Amino acid sequence: MNIRAQVSMVFHLDKCLGCHTCSVACKNLWTDRSGVEYQWWNNVETKPGTGYPSSWENQDEYKGGWEKVGNTVRLRATGKLRGYTNIFFQPHLPTIDDYYEPWTYKYEDLFDSPPQDTQPTARPISLITGEHIDTIEAGPNWDDDLSGTKFYARKDPGILKLSPDEQKAIFEFQRIAFFYLPRICNHCLNPACVASCPSGALYKRGEDGIVLINQDVCRGWRFCVSACPFKKSYYNWKTGKSEKCILCYPRIETGQPQACFHSCVGRIRYMGGVLYDADKIEATAASEEKDLVNNQKAMILDPKDPAIIKQAQKDGVHMSFIESAQKSPVFKFVKDWEIALPLHAEFRTVPQLYYVLPLLPVLAVKKGNTFEVDNTEFFGAIDKNRLPLKYFASLFSAGNEELIVKAFKRMLAVRYYKRQQEVGDLDKSKMLDAMSQAGISEKVAEDIFKMISIPTYNERFVVPPLHREYQTAIDGDIDTYMGQPYAYKAATGFGPRKGVKRGL
Ligand code: SF4
Ligand code: SF4
C-alpha cells in the first residue's frame, strides 16, 4: 500500500442554477488575459447537449483518455512511441471552431459615431483577428437551456448511444428535460495529460494531488490537450504554452476554497481531502467497465482507520491532512452515502470530481399525456423518469445502471423521509420500507439532508492545511508511474520546480 493525499470535490447537480457565476469567477481570476480568451477552466453546460468544446465526450473523434490493453492501460492517441513519431502533427486536437471564436464588442462606436438617422451599435469583433465578425455562431455555453433542439441535445454523444426508439421517446415535447453540468479539471489520479507530455511539464503535486503545468518546461506540443478526455487542458496561442485549471492552489495554500467553489450561488460545491492507495491506480484504471466506479471508490481509504493513519504517516502524509480528510464531505458523499459518482469513469483517468445525480428529471413520471411528480409511487419513478437510466449511466457510472439506481433510491428515500416528517402525507410504513430498500437509516437520511440543504461554510469546504516546512524537505522528489512523471512531491505550479529548493 502506498497512501497519498488528494484534494477531491463533489458537485450536487440538483442545486445548480446554471447561473455561470462560477465560470465568471474563474475567468476574472485566471483567464482574463490575451491568448486565453476562449478558455473556460470552469464551464457549465446543459445536458443533454454537446458542451464545450463541441462533442468533447466523443473519443472516436478526439481520442482522449486511456484504453484497456490486457491488465494495463495505454493512452488512446499519444503515448511515448506514437507521441514522438507524431510530434509535429496531431490530428485529434480540437480546433478554435470546436471551442468558439472569442469576441468582444466595439463599444467605442456607441460614443464616437457621427450623427446619423439610426442608433449606433457595438459590433462584435474577434479577439483573435481583431476583425469584425458577421454572425456569432458559437459560444462557451451556446446550447444553454436548449435541450431538445436537433443541433445540440440530439447530438449529445450519450444520447447517440441510445436506440432510435429511446431517442425518439425522450424528445417527446412533454418529456423534454435538462440539467446543468458544471465542469472543471478533475485533477485525476491517473491523469492522461501528465502521462502524454513529451516534455515532462505536467505533474501531480504529491501533497494534495493538484495537476499543474510547469510553464518553463512546457514546449507547447499540446499532447495534453489531445490526451485529456475532458478537454480541460488548453493552448495559449499567445505564449505558445498549454494551460489548465490550477484548482486555485494559491487560495488553497492560504486556507481558502477555490474561487468557483466560494462564489457558487447554488452552493452545490463541496471540497475536502481524501487518502487513496496509489498502488491500485493501474489495476483500477484497467478494470472491466462495469467495475470501474466500484474499484475507484475502493481506492479511497478510511482516514479514521488507525492502520490507515499509521501507514499514511509512514508514506509522508502529514497528520493535519489526515485530520482534515476525517472531516471531508467528499468521503461522506462518495464512500459513506454512495450518492456521488465520477463523470465518465470509462475514460480511465480516475477523476476526482464526483457528482450527486440530478433527481429532478426522475421525479416526474408519465400520467396519461403529461409528466407529474408522484409521491406515492416511490421508486417506480426511477424507471419511468424523463431521462433514461442508460443516459445517466453513460455519464456517471461507465454504463453500470445498478449504481445509478442505488444513488437515486437513496436520494428519493431522503426526500420521502423529509416529506413524511414535514408534510406527513405519505404512508409511513411504506416510507420506512423504502428507506430500508435504499439501505439508509433515519440518522443517515438526516445527515444527507443537512449536508445537501443547510450545510455551513466549514462543512462544505474542508481546506487541508499546507505545511511548507515539510514540503521543502522532499523538494525534487519525483515519482514515476508507467514511465511518466507522476508527482513532484513538493512542487507548486508555474515556475521551475524539479530539484529547486524553495524558501520557507
Ligand atoms: Fe488532466 Fe485534468 Fe484532463 Fe484529468 S481532467 S486528464 S487531470 S487535464
Ligand atoms: Fe451552478 Fe454554482 Fe456555477 Fe451557478 S455558480 S452555474 S449554481 S455551479
Image: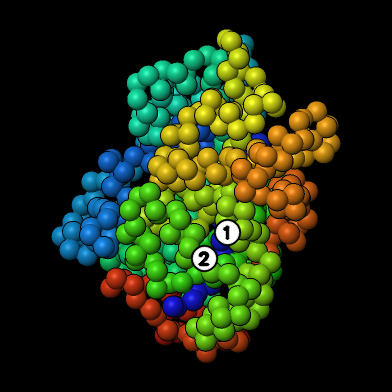
Residue 48 x/y as whole percent: 48, 31
Q: What residue appears at the point 26 percent right and 63 percent down from the top-left corner?
A: 71
Please give left or right for residue 10 compared with residue 484 in the image: right
Query: For the N terminus, which image quadrant?
Result: bottom left
Query: Is the residue 135 above or below the residue 223 in the image?
Result: above
Q: Amino acid at mark 1?
A: Lys
The answer to whether the residues at label 2 and label 1 have Cβ atoms under 8 Å apart is yes
Asked if ligand 1 lies within 8 A of label 1, the reply is no
Mark 2 lies on residue? 300
Mark 1 lies on residue? 335
Please give left or right for residue 68 compared with residue 307 in the image: left
Residue 16 x/y as whole percent: 64, 39
Q: Quadrant of residue 380?
A: top right
Q: What residue appears at the point 38 percent right and 78 percent down from the top-left corner?
A: 479
- The residue nearer to you, when weighing 113 against 465, is 465
Q: What residue appears at the point 46 percent right and 72 percent down from the top-left corner?
A: 277
